[in-house]
Image (tube, helix red, strand yellow):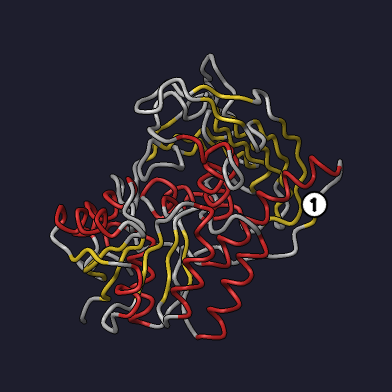
């Protein structure tokens, strides 16, 4: 079966990760990259042995079926709509879009055009989270009762070369890192029915201490500490905290899922591997569980590759627009609930994505 030809729009830092990983995924071939700064696209193309060009040239290429949108969050919706209008499928980095209204426009246009929309994060397709989903499905912790998720950091201004957008509309810890945690939770526990939350801006101004913008001030526009409660449709209750305001470190686990027969300690959802630890009811011993699925190292791009396979086969793709929209709505719901002092009832739902094939049965093609 021939590969799906893929183009990238946006040649910033994250594009290198997709290009470095492309050999892992025989379902797609990244053949070109584009950027508003055409010179930067050409340089990136030369670095990785592909064609660098303008966005207009890329979208006009009839041989390219799928576009990976790696622009900044504020441009996600506009570029996705442009891609769909050009008659191509689109896979976008997280967050799906900045607003719910934008996301709905993207999904509605894709449906009218008969095209697919996918969205990062795809880390839930790594061996770590996939094994956790399988453990829960097979009853290793019994009936899921509750879950906790914590992303505690001091922010990006100490290391990122251009951290401003993390503190502007579309940024903040929930929109930056929440997609990893919430997508993993939805993959394990299913869709969300209701959320509530509290949020605050702890430091109205940030000082960049990384290069090349050392000493520059950043005005903070979005909450930098968000605490949320989640009611899952299947009955479990979740707690999530995302923060850029933790200046002294934290020892909290990334994610734990508590069931009637045990507790599952889930690995970092921003990665693809383990470790996974299980503590069964009546025991105080944590046992490390071997990973039953592949893609345990850096496999960024697996979501786009799975989408390429779906384009070829006609099956559903796993990192799909409906789940991405559901996660986006929940993230807005935490902020809405904090502002309004109430619960936010979810209007969307989604299906839990199908598991990948077990590692022992993986075909050389890479994805089932």
Q: Is residue 192 left or right of residue 25?
A: right
Q: Is residue 74 above or below residue 85?
A: above
Quarter of the picture holding the C terminus: bottom left
Image quarter of residue 323: bottom right
Residue at 34 percent across and 72 percent down: it is: 308
As rendered, which of 277 and 38 lies closer to the eye? 38
> Which secondary structure, mark 1?
strand
Q: Position of residue 264 (x, y in %)?
A: 52, 38
Q: Position of residue 226 (x, y in %)?
A: 67, 35
As rendered, which of 221 and 17 lies closer to the eye? 221
Q: Is residue 278 above or below residue 52?
A: above
User: Which residue is labeled 1 in the image?
Assistant: 344
Residue at 47 percent across and 30 percent down: it is: 156
Quarter of the picture holding the N terminus: bottom left
Q: Is residue 352 above or below residue 309?
A: above
Residue at 63 percent across and 60 percent down: it is: 326
Q: Position of residue 294 (x, y in %)?
A: 30, 53
As rendered, which of 325 and 204 lies closer to the eye? 204
Q: Is residue 359 left or right of residue 167?
A: left
């Amino acid at each position: 079966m021939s590969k799906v030809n893929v183009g990238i729009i946006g040649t910033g830092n994250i594009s290198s990760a997709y290009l470095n990983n492309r050999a892992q995924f025989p379902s797609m071939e990244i053949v070109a990259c584009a950027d508003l700064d055409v010179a930067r696209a050409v340089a990136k193309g030369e670095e990785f042995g592909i064609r660098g060009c303008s966005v207009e040239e890329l979208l006009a290429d009839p041989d390219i079926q799928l576009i990976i949108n790696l622009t900044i969050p504020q441009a996600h919706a506009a570029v996705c709509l442009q891609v769909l209008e050009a008659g191509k499928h689109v896979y976008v980095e997280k967050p799906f879009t900045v607003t719910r209204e934008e996301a709905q426009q993207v999904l509605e246009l894709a449906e009218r055009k008969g095209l697919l929309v996918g969205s990062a994060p795809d880390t839930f397709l790594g061996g770590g989270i996939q094994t956790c989903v399988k453990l829960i499905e097979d009853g290793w912790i019994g009936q899921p009762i509750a879950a906790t998720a914590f992303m505690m950091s001091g922010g990006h201004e100490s290391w990122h070369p251009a951290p401003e957008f993390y503190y502007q509309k579309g940024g903040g810890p929930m929109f930056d890192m929440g997609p990893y945690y919430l997508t993993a939770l939805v993959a394990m526990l299913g869709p969300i029915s209701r959320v509530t939350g509290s949020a605050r801006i702890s430091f109205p101004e940030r000082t960049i201490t990384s290069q090349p913008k050392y000493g520059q001030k950043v005005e903070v526009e979005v909450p930098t500490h968000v605490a949320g409660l989640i009611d899952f449709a299947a009955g479990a209750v979740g707690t999530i905290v995302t923060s850029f305001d933790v200046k002294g470190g934290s020892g909290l686990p990334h994610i734990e899922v508590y069931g009637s027969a045990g507790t599952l300690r889930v690995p970092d959802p921003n990665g693809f591997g383990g470790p996974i630890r299980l503590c069964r009811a009546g025991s105080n011993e944590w046992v490390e569980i071997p990973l039953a699925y592949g893609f345990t190292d850096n496999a960024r791009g697996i979501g786009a590759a799975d989408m390429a396979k779906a384009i070829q086969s006609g099956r559903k793709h796993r990192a799909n627009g409906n789940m991405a929209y559901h996660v986006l709505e929940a993230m807005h719901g935490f902020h809405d609930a904090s502002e309004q002092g109430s619960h936010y009832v979810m209007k969307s739902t989604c299906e839990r994505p199908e598991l990948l094939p077990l590692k022992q049965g993986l075909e050389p093609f890479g994805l089932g």
